[in-house]
Image: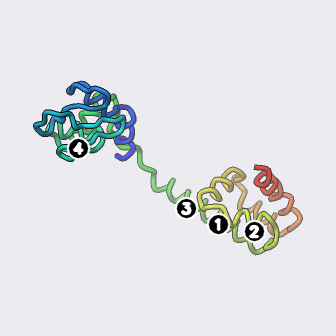
Amino acid sequence: MRHHIDAIKSSIHVNDYASRYLDIKQGVALCPFHVERTPSLRLHREYFFCFGCGAGGDVIKFAARYHELSNGDAIRLLAAESGISLTPPPKLKPYDRAKEERIAAEAEEWRNQVRKRAKNWPAADLLRAMSRRELVDEYKGHRTKDLGEEMRAIMRDTEQWVKAITPLVQASLNA
């Protein structure tokens, strides 16, 4: 739902929406939420604020308050106006989540093996500093169907392992 709200806010600006209902001059208008003679409502692209009554917020708050709607109804109104669908994004299948967890576990094992075998080597520091997401992405980039077996074979032969990891270190040092 959060991405729908962000999409609405980025597609409809408060000052543009309010200009349909208010006479705005240089970003200032009479506040529709209380009686006043001197304009005290300030309008910007992303928010509004009234120095007279203290009303303020984003385009959703303005629409809700102006049309006397709940926030949910205001979101639906603005989504319909801007052509944004409020259907939720598809959920990950349990299999996909399990697969991601398995890959993350493999990546962590890879990092642990590097730590054990090359404590003073620059790649160990690089992999230690990577966040879990970065590590998984890097690991996926080099992953094959037989990677688990390939990794075990490389780990058994330190020289092969150094040849395999050196491009990663050089790329990070050149970046």
Residue at the location (85% across, 62% down)? Answer: 162
Q: Distance from label 1 to label 4 (Cα)?
A: 54 Å
Task: Give the mark, 1 or 4, whose residue is nearer the N terminus.
Answer: 4
Label 1 residue SS:
helix
| Disc marking residue 51 | 4
Label 4 residue SS:
loop
Q: Are marks 1 and 4 in contact (CB under 8 Å)?
A: no
Q: Are marks 2 and 3 in contact (CB under 8 Å)?
A: no
Check disc 1 and give the amino acid type.
Glu
Q: Are marks 3 and 4 in contact (CB under 8 Å)?
A: no
| Disc marking residue 101 | 3
Check disc 3 and give the amino acid type.
Glu
Viewer-nearest of discs 1 and 4: 4
Residue 55, given in percent of the width and then of the height, sits at: 21, 45
Q: Are marks 2 and 4 in contact (CB under 8 Å)?
A: no
Between residues 85 and 19, which one lies in front from this camera angle? Answer: 19
Is 7 rendered above or below residue 83? below
Task: Give the mark, 2 or 3, whose residue is nearer the N terminus.
Answer: 3
Check disc 2 and give the amino acid type.
Val
- Kindly identify which residue carries mark 2: 114
Residue 52, given in percent of the width and then of the height, sits at: 18, 43
